[in-house]
Amino acid sequence: MDVLPRDIATPPRVLGSDLIDYLITSANLQGDSDDRHLWTRAADVIDSAHLYTAALDATPDWSVIRWIPAEESGLPTVIAFSEGANTTVMIRHARGGPSTRCR
């Protein structure tokens, strides 16, 4: 029997309302730039009552945070990619729906 990390550790879960607070706070840090609208758009697709699985991949130079809803929910995944001072936000819809990349 092969034991995988996911068999031992439970990925962290984030309540949608907490994720919305984080995204709105990030939007406010963007000032009046176009990026502010993109962060608030990401917050708009989050269901405040839903639990999202958080996944983080990082090196000293970059990080990727994914907030993944339950597969059967039909909700999009929100992804933030940071490299240096640049952060890109992506909204990815399940099963062939449109993806929105925000910078």
Image: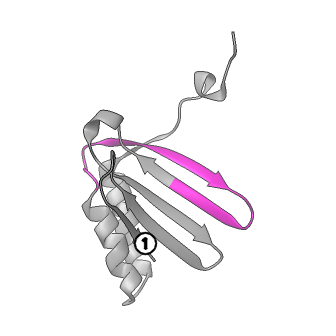
- Quadrant in which the N terminus is drawn: top right
Residue 9, position as x, y percentages in the image: 60, 28
Magenta segment: does it hold 71?
A: no
Quadrant of the rendered image containing residue 43: bottom left
Picture quadrant where residue 63 is located = bottom right
Q: Main secondary structure of the magenta part?
A: strand
Numbered disc 1: secondary structure = helix
Instruction: Tell me the residue that label 1 is attached to.
Output: 26
1 is higher (above) or lower (below) than 86? above
Q: Residue at x 41, y 69 (%)?
A: 101
Vertical arrangement, residue 55 with respect to residue 22, above or below? above
Residue visible at 33% across and 53% down in the picture: 93
Is disc 1 surrounded by few (<14), some (14 to 19) or many (20+) residues within 10 Å?
some
Give the x, y percent position of residue 51.
Answer: 34, 40
Q: Which residues are magenta?
A: 46-65
Residue at coordinates 25% horizontally, 50% vertically from top-left?
47
